[in-house]
Amino acid sequence: MKTLKFLIEKEFKQMFRNPLIPRLIVLFPTMVLLVFPWAVSFEIKNIRIDVVDHSKSTYSKRLTDKVSASQYFILHDTPPDYNTAMLNMENDKTDMILEIPSSFDVDLVKSRDSEVGVAVNSVNGTQGLLGSNYIMQIVNDLSSELRGELTQTLPPQLRASMMHMPKIDIVPQYKFNPALDYKNFMIPGFMVLLLTILCGILPALNIVMEKENGTINQINVTPVSKMNFILAKLIPYWAVGLVVMIISITLSLLIYGLWPAGGVIAVLISAIVFILSVSGLGIIISNYSETMQQASFLVMFFILILVLLGGMFTPVSSMPAWAQWIAAINPFNYLTDTFRMLYLNGSTLADVSGNLLALGVIAVILNGWAVFSYKKRG
Amino acid sequence: MRDNRTLLIILGMPVVEILLFGFAINMEVQDIRVAFYDPTPDAFTTGITERVKQNSYFTYRGDMHSMDDMEESMRKGELDLAVVFQQNFQENLVHSGEAAIQLLSNSSDPNRGSIAVTYATAIIAGFQQEQTELMQIPFQIQAENRMIYNPLMKSSYMFVPGIMGLVLMIICTIMTSVSIVREKERGTMEVLLASPLKQGTMIFAKTIPYMVISFIDFVIILLLSYFILGVPVNGSLLLLFLVAILYITLTLSYGLTVSTLVDKQVNAVIFSAITAMIPVLMLSGMIFPVDNMPQALQAFSAIVPARWFIEAVRKVMIQGLGITMIWKEVLIMFGMTLFLLGVTIAKTKKRLE
């Protein structure tokens, strides 16, 4: 135990000899939580649209007005033909084109059925889909408005039958995030991202740095056990991670008014288990690397996989089955899910115990591997 | 670069990542876990229930027997949507002409929450339309949709250029900054700087091998995206290569600049990793469209090189546009490169004096 204490003291001294590290621990979470939550939103507003109106009738005019009055669209231009509008799309001046055929009003009145053309830039699939959905809504609104006006002119018995259509009331209730605020959803994810970067990169560079500096040989000739050596490497990152968590929890309360309904203790406990697993991964990388450059490439490689396949940005449930298997061994995925449940759903420690167990198993395996792969005489 | 293992990592990393992310990253909301609470089952409610169960977006998770059950499984994160029918649903609908369905959606993920409600609403409306056998509705306006550039709505069209920007940024920045700082740490840099070679020539000579390796990386990513992910190359291949070379030069210059700012390898790694990864993920438009951000962040995102690269690649590769449509992006990247090289040379000179 005494050896461990001295080793830990050595690690702390080594860590704080580099003036960048303490600054990083405080400034990095502050910056990230202050700036980036504002950048995340899938809500599509301000879609630029060109309306090509071949009809130039009262009805087409009403449709154009409805589009430009909508909060989702900005009417960019009303070019005379489709090709001009298409050129605007190529020049990235507009995102959507609504084309109203010249027979629009005639069709509407005579055959009671008319068609408009919608072309949308769908490089960003979500934007394309939502944009065309919004147009559908506007078009439907217009047709029911027109229908309402028409019913006034219908014979009374027909009007009565239209009024008496049974109506199903659909009452949506958005639980846990009634304002549908994307920031609330992403902030717990940012906390996990911070922990992953700091408690993943720093340990990955640690042992390999001692290899490059030659100080590892000094440790190797002492009777320090592998277990103690690795433990002493891990514990300081626990401390780093906890400081990061405390800063993050405080900032998200002060700036965004977010507080874990499931209890702050539960948040810290799950963070501790998670830090163990990413730091373990970092140490494994460090053990296998010969140079700092190798270690840094490898750790970035794994961090990207942890993050991008970890459900922070895109849902795990929409990944193919093999990728969901990767997610099942991805600690990032478990902690993001846990934090979101604790912060938003008001889940309790008992509710997230399954995730904690998975994180614990991952941590034990990774750290066992870390001890094993540290070749003392290497 | 006398190191095969590092080379293997640099060339292997993009291969694994483009394949993993190209196939796995998908925005589409699927597998919405749904449960029903139906106190008085009747023909209408079972009809709606069946229809929701059969829909491919929904995964049926069982019937609930009380609102408390429902609350609990939502809190545990087992449920995305709960459909709650009013008591005596059919009776109400037939007699008073009105009945209510409550849709409780787990909206901790707002995107998922609102899309689940949209899908369910559409199913219920469709069911009702069938039941009431509507008379032909007058004033019907149909909208015919055309998805330009990405007719199949594949997520990879959007993400592949982003992943290119991200992976190249990380590799180029870390590669240059760490290896130059390593020479600084060991003192071999001083030997080189003291030699009669001009600084410009020296820096140029240093970066050439990195440029070659990064370009090979780009070609590998491009081949995999085209042949395996099926992302088209609609524009000129030559133009795409030129954009890539410009971006690689830019990111290498950034690595050089980082190397003049720090003097420890650890710090070079931390600095490059943080500045190359987070801004690209968050602000480049790779995942979140830049147009939706607040003005201040849009302005901030203008200094993220990957933003311009990703825009240019999307235009050339997916939209098939020519040089006249991307001159802005090209000029900005060119300007950034000159600026970073200028800073690097100035810093190096100062250190020597």
Image: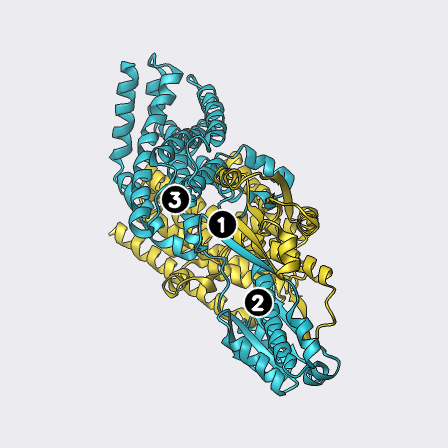
Chain colours: A cyan, B yellow
- Is residue B241 at all visible to an observer of this figure? no
- Quarter holding residue A153: bottom right
**Residue positioned 62% across, 52% down in the render:** B89
Q: Looking at the image, which is closer to me, B148 or B70? A: B70
Label 1: few (<14), some or many (≥20) within 10 Å? many
In the image: residue B13, left or right of residue A260? right
| SS at badge 2 | helix
Label 3: few (<14), some or many (≥20) within 10 Å? many
Label 2: few (<14), some or many (≥20) within 10 Å? some
Q: Looking at the image, which is closer to me, A243 or B30? A: B30
Checking the image for residue B235, the label placed there is none
Q: What whole-number distance in Å separates the C-alpha atoms at marks 2 and 3?
A: 53 Å
Tell me the chain of label 3: B
Identify residue for label 1: B107
> Looking at the image, is B90 positioned above or below residue A197?
below
Residue B325 position in % (x across, y down): 55, 71
Residue B144 position in % (x across, y down): 69, 70
Tags 3 and 1 touching, CB below 8 Å: no
Q: Are marks 1 and 2 on the same chain?
A: no
Tell me the chain of label 1: B
Checking the image for residue A134, the label placed there is 2
Amino acid beneath label 2 = Tyr
Q: What whole-number distance in Å separates the C-alpha atoms at marks 3 and 1?
A: 48 Å
> Looking at the image, is A161 positioned above or below residue B173?
below
Amino acid beneath label 1 = Ser
- Is residue A255 at all visible to an observer of this figure? yes
Identify residue for label 3: B180
| SS at badge 3 | helix
| SS at badge 1 | loop
Q: Looking at the image, which is closer to me, B297 or A354? A: A354
Amino acid beneath label 3 = Ile
> Of circles 2 and 3, which is in front?
2
